Image: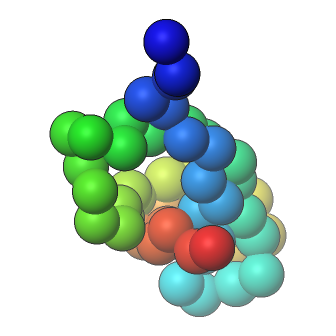
């Protein structure tokens, strides 16, 4: 059985920093946005999924 999880790249909206995370393709088919810590800016900012 194939895995339903997909590795995605989350890029900061205010700097060049990025995270890698996984998401469930069937539960969230669209692009995700998460508020996470950006060490370049030293604050929490929104990270959006990129391809």
Query: How is the protein colored in the picture?
Result: rainbow
Percent x, y for residue 23? 44, 39
Percent x, y for residue 31? 36, 67
Residue plotted at (69% across, 48% down): 20
Of 34 and 41, nearer the camera is 34
Of 33 and 4, nearer the camera is 4
41 relative position to 1: left or right: right
Quarter of the image where one finds residue 50: bottom right
View extreme (top): residue: 1
Quarter of the image where the C terminus is located: bottom right
Of 42 and 26, nearer the camera is 26
Percent x, y for residue 1? 49, 12
Q: In this view, does 25 lie above or below 45?
A: above
User: Can residue 9 be seen?
Assistant: yes
Q: In this view, does 29 lie above or below 51?
A: above
Mark count = 0
Residue plotted at (50% across, 68% down): 49
View extreme (front): residue: 1
Q: In this view, does 45 lie above or below 39?
A: below
User: Can residue 38 be seen?
Assistant: no
View extreme (left): residue: 27
30 relative position to 2: left or right: left
Residue plotted at (69% across, 53% down): 19
10 relative position to 17: left or right: left
Quarter of the image where one finds residue 29: bottom left
């Amino acid at each position: 059985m194939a895995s339903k999880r997909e590795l995605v790249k989350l890029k900061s909206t205010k700097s060049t920093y990025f995270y890698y995370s996984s998401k469930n393709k069937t539960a969230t088919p669209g692009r995700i946005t998460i508020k996470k810590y950006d060490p370049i800016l030293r604050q929490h900012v929104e990270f959006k999924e990129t391809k």
